[in-house]
Amino acid sequence: MGWIGEQVDSLKSMQFRQLFTQAISLGMIVTSALIIWKGLMCITGSESPVVVVLSGSMEPGFKRGDILFLHMSKEPIRAGEIVVFNVDGREIPIVHRVIKVHEHEDGEVDVLTKGDNNFGDDRLLYAQGQMWLQRHHIMGRAVGFLPYVGWVTIIMTEQPIIKYILIGALGLLVITSKE
């Protein structure tokens, strides 16, 4: 019958109270993950404290599948820093290096970025007519990374069926656990 059949039979034989307790446990796991994420947002000052590199534009420094840890401080952004930014009209953030900084008299800075593995700057990636990024476009500065760990996210994004199978199996495992 197999592992899945055994899990389904186990689920059918559970009492309502036990099933309810397991569902609460699953809810607590999900809630804990969200609390950790929100806590990281507060600590790092970044709306997304962890991002996955999705392209080869930053090679050889960062490869596709690397996970970056972000921090956003009040200090001005400087040339040479690696930042993650959102562009108006695009959902997916971009990881590139700051190559030019334009400072205003009021202390605000505009930045121009470029992927290390790209030939030209990112003005073609910015919104139409936009020549510089302002601070509100920048999600954070890269402060650390884990190589290749982000491939799990890339595979689950590119092959959604794998994501649904994994989530379903984990949920079934939590609900049918005997403890």
Image: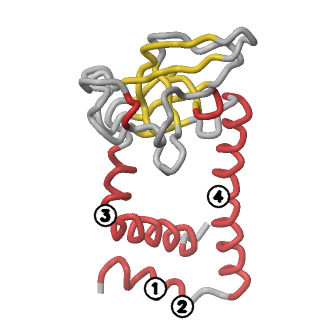
Looking at the picture, how far across and down is residue 24, in whole percent? 71, 70
Q: What kind of residue is marked 3?
A: Gln
What residue does disc 4 label? 29
Secondary structure at badge 4 equals helix
> Reading the chain from its start, which is encountered first: label 1 or label 4?
1
What residue does disc 3 label? 159
Q: What kind of residue is marked 1?
A: Val
Badge 2 vs badge 1, beta-carbon distance below 8 Å: yes
Looking at the picture, how far across and down is residue 158, in whole percent? 31, 59
Badge 1 vs badge 4, beta-carbon distance below 8 Å: no
Secondary structure at badge 3 equals loop
**Left or right for 163, reference 51:** left
What residue does disc 2 label? 12
- In the rendering, which numbered label is found on residue 88? none
> Can you say whether 114 is above or below 19 in the image?
above
Badge 4 vs badge 2, beta-carbon distance below 8 Å: no
Q: CA distance from mark 3 to mark 2?
A: 31 Å
Secondary structure at badge 2 equals helix
> Reading the chain from its start, which is encountered first: label 1 or label 3?
1
> Reading the chain from its start, which is encountered first: label 3 or label 4?
4
- In the rendering, which numbered label is found on residue 8? 1
Q: Nearer the viewer, residue 131 or 36?
A: 131
> Can you say whether 167 is above or below 31 in the image?
below
Q: What kind of residue is marked 4?
A: Ile
**Left or right for 82, reference 119:** right
